[in-house]
Image (cartoon, grey):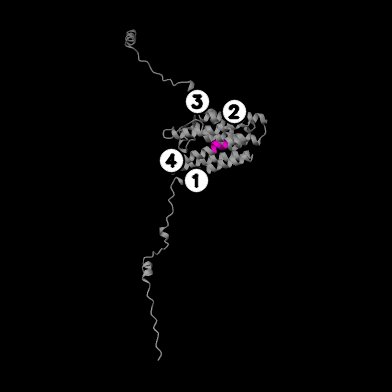
Amino acid sequence: MPEKRTMHKAEPNPKYARRNRFKAKRRFKMGQVKLPRVSRSAFPSTFTVMNMLCGYGSIIFAEQREYALAGWFIILAAVFDTIDGFIARLTNSSSEFGVELDSLSDLVSFGAAPSFLAYKFGLEQFGIWGAVLSSALMVGSGLRLARFNVQLVGFSKDYFSGLPTPSQAMTLSSFVIWTSGEYFLTIEQTTLALTVLTLTLALLMVSTVKYDLLPKPKEFKKYPFKTVAFALGFLAILMFQAKGFFFAMCAYILFGIVRYVYFFFSEEVTEQRAEPSADAVSSNHKSNH
């Protein structure tokens, strides 16, 4: 009879058996994947970034000589700047990062963008002097923002010290939008007006002239005159668009200047009632008798 062949199981090599015994096994677990935590300050910062992007878009449109679009993008940046501050106060998510990002965005949208718009719209014809003149808006905005950040802890809640950078930018933008759509001024007159406006706005930003903040809804009854004035300004903007915007901003600027001059040349006088002397009292008593 033929012999049966028995199959023997090969014994593992001890060299590789030890290695396989300690080989780590990896498994993918969804529970271990953690998404980064999003802070509350991220939401208002999103609108701050939109503010910066609008300023950059304004520069692009100004280079393409689309002056009206460039001006509207600066105004849109001011809208985003207002929204991010409102949301930061509403959600109590103000942070040092948000303050710094807001300042950098404002320098782009309300400093570099208006400067370049003024240069391309009329000051470019002066060559290097036009570049120097238009840069006054950017330099003034940088100084104004730096001073605001330094005084941020104790600044007055009722007034701004110096013309705010968004107000300056919206004033110049509305002028460009208005005059680029309605040709009622000659080129020389437009250039002269733009030069005066640029220098005036730059000086007002670094001045100490006080300008009112936009009143909050709960302050409407507390400041009725201020509320009515801002409401009339919004009405003028709705009715006359860029023209109304420019004149509303001019009224805001002039009111601050007039108030500053009034308080500068006047002093508060408190009337003190003089007390009668002892001799006067005795003489008056004798005359009555």
Give the residue type that dot 2 points to: Val
The verdict on residue 111 being magenta is yes
- Residue 140: horizontal and vertical position, in percent? 52, 32
Q: Which residue is mark 2?
A: 196
Is residue 137 visible in the rendered image? The answer is yes
Give the magenta-colored segment's residue range. Answer: 109-114
Question: Going from the N terminus, do you reach mark 4 or mark 1 first?
Answer: 1
- Left or right side of 183 for 104: left
**Would you say the magenta stretch is mainly helix, strand or loop?**
helix
Residues at marks 4 and 2, CA–CA distance in whole angstroms: 36 Å
Cβ–Cβ under 8 Å for marks 1 and 2: no
The Cα–Cα distance between marks 1 and 2, rounded to whole angstroms, is 36 Å
Q: Nearer the viewer, mark 3 or mark 2?
A: 2
Of the residues shown, which amino acid type is indicated by label 4?
Glu
Give the mark, 1 or 2, whose residue is nearer the N terminus: 1
- Residue carrying label 3: 260
Residue matched to label 1: 46
- Dividing the picture into quarters, in which one does residue 65 lie? top right
Considering the numbered disc 1 on the image, is that residue within a helix, a strand or a loop? helix
Q: Nearer the viewer, residue 152 or 20?
A: 20
Q: CA distance from mark 3 to mark 1?
A: 37 Å
Q: For mark 4, what is the residue?
A: 96
Residue 108, magenta (yes or no): no
How far is mark 3 from mark 2, CA to CA? 20 Å
Pick the front one: 69 or 12: 12
Residue at the spot 38% in from the left edge and 72% down from the top edge: 13
| Label 2 element class | helix
At horizontal 36% and vertical 68% (from top left) the residue drawn is 18
